[in-house]
Image (cartoon, grey):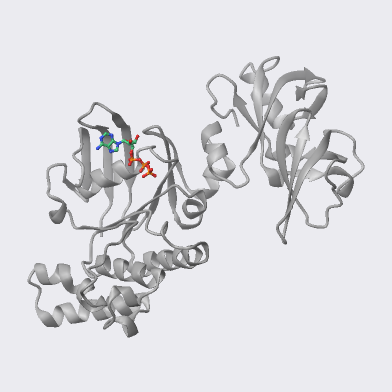
Amino acid sequence: MAGLNLKNIEKVYPNGFHAVHDFNLDIEDKEFIVFVGPSGCGKSTTLRMIAGLEEISSGELYIGENIVNDVAPKDRDIAMVFQNYALYPHMTVFDNMAFGLKLRKMPKDEINQKVTDAARILGIENLLKRKPKQLSGGQRQRVALGRAIVRNPKVFLMDEPLSNLDAKLRVQMRAEISKLHQSLQTTFIYVTHDQTEAMTMGTRIVVMKDGFVQQVADPQTIYKHPSNMFVASFIGSPQMNFIECTLKEENNNVYAEFKGNKVTLSAENSKTLKDLGYVNKEVVLGIRPENMFVHSEVSDNKDNVIETNVQVTEMLGSETYLHLDMQNQNVIARVDPSTKAEIGKNINIGFDITKIHIFDKDTEKAVF
Ligand code: ATP
């Protein structure tokens, strides 16, 4: 078990491509860290540098107390599970799990013990004599995890380990990996492009874009207080709605104006915007789909109500997504399935003003 420290890590590939810029992160022992971001953002490169599979161009990587930049992968005390978990097809499950230990010349009794223990943790004791082709995708993934567990590593590294599984199995394995983390009490670093995996599994999430870290925080903080428009749009599904508007002041309160509509902001937020000089400036207002409501279903108060046209309704059983044309800006509201909204009809939409975000139009950074 160990913490890790990444200090000013950079990766420039031999062709000159700068894949990771100034990556800094202090990972405590037993954390479950998730690197998340779109394809090409540098998350796998960073993980591979931690594993020792990719050279670190500059910066320092510590595992525990030791700087490991020049330590060979096999001596870093880490185990890695990949997306294509390449089991040896001619070996049984037992032998697949035992293989690395045999190479290390571990005594047979000890190997037996370790493989049996790992198989019990993963619930695959009854599969030990089977060959990989006799297993389902989820079972194979468990064997790949078992192969990592038997090594008793200080750190587990996982690169999209669930992306080859079907949706239902992914949900199941997601919970199993979280349970595994709890029972092993070891540091996990997990790479995914799937924001749901990041939100549900991570104790902390590192959101990346174009080789730069955008935000590092626990899932709730990332969701409630995204640091910029990229994080706000990447985390959460359907994504946060963005509405271009101008901030105006009236009776000491600040309101957002767009196409003749007004959304009054809370007293606290008004003060922040005034103090920072945002009055009379163009900004981007962010509101999550669940923080919008169909007005007639909630109250008769006509403040902060915007007329929209229903373009599409998506019934999901427990909720309904309304795709709305809000004065030529497309937005999605997540509402109760009992909604009477009909395609082509106009409905009034209200905002929960305590949940509004404002972003600087130039820097795209969150004011709040
Ligand atoms: P994905 O989800 O698609 O795996 P990722 O965020 O893990 O994406 P990386 O694999 O880390 O992305 O790649 C980051 C960037 O570095 C990409 O633009 C990729 O094209 C580039 N890259 C990766 N390997 C090399 C290489 N060997 N030489 C040059 N550029 C590379």
Q: Residue at x 54, y 44 (%)?
A: 235
Q: Considering the image in quadrants, where does the N terminus appear? A: bottom left
> In this rendering, would 340 be left or right of 147?
right
> In this rendering, would 56 be left or right of 293?
left
- Mark yes or no: residue 270 visible: yes
Q: Residue at x 45, y 40 (%)?
A: 38
Q: Vertically, is 53 above or below 211? A: below
Residue 194: horizontal and vertical position, in percent?
48, 50
Residue 294: horizontal and vertical position, in percent?
82, 45
Location of residue 114 by image quarter = bottom left
Q: Residue at x 39, y 66 (%)?
A: 182
- Mark yes or no: residue 254 visible: no
Residue 134: horizontal and vertical position, in percent?
34, 77
Query: In what quadrant does ligand 1 lie?
Result: top left
Q: Vertically, is 131 above or below 234? A: below
As drawn, which residue projects farthest toward the left?
A: 105
Location of residue 350 by image quarter = top right
